[in-house]
Amino acid sequence: MKKLMLILVLFNNSIKASEKSINNTWCSSYNGVIEYRTSYGTYVDCLTNEFAIEVEFDYKWKESIGQSFHYAEATNKKPGILIIKRSKSKKDYLEELNKTITKFNLPITIFIIDEQAIQ
């Protein structure tokens, strides 16, 4: 019985789209450059004509703020964040992100995609 449960867990995890696959699909739809290398040796998840975009799952929103500003500075683009909303999230991470952006008047554009939209 334990072997069957382990197989089911592995199977369920393999169904979910990865951050990379979501970024690849989303960025391509915006004619962006995937994994653009900056002069610092860092990689912008998606570079469009207007935005340097950091792609993160919703629970990692805090890290995305700093990275989006770094990428914007490195590329002379506007900072953007693509938040991947997970169906299993218990908290409204997007609300926390928006409150922080509003409180400090941060010039970040937020894009949102549902984790299940790309699979």
Image: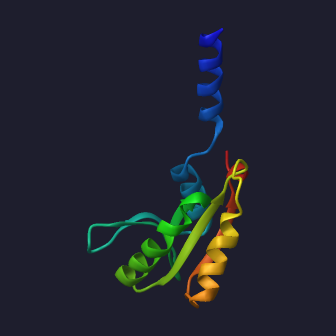
Up-down: is 99 above or below 62? below
Up-down: is 33 above or below 17? below
Residue 49 appears in the picture as rendered: no
Q: Residue at x 59, y 33 (%)?
A: 14
Position of residue 113 measured from the top left corner of the image (x, y, whole percent):
68, 61
Identify the image's colour scheme: rainbow, by chain, secondary structure or one colour.
rainbow
Position of residue 91 measured from the top left corner of the image (x, y, whole percent):
70, 59
The answer to whether 95 appears left or right of 77 in the picture is right
Up-down: is 76 above or below 82? below
Up-down: is 60 above or below 4? below
Position of residue 107 measured from the top left corner of the image (x, y, whole percent):
55, 88
The answer to whether 64 appears left or right of 6 in the picture is left
Quadrant (top left/top right/bottom left/bottom right) for the N terminus = top right
The answer to whether 100 appears left or right of 43 in the picture is right
State the residue in front, 17 or 2.
2
Q: Residue at x 71, y 47 (%)?
A: 88
Q: Residue at x 72, y 49 (%)?
A: 116
State the residue in front, 19 or 28.
19
Residue reaching furthest to the top: 1
Quadrant (top left/top right/bottom left/bottom right) for the C terminus = top right
Number of marks: 0
Position of residue 19 measured from the top left corner of the image (x, y, whole percent):
54, 52
Q: Based on the displayed image, in which of its 4 quarters is residue 98 positioned?
A: bottom right
State the residue in front, 76 or 85.
85
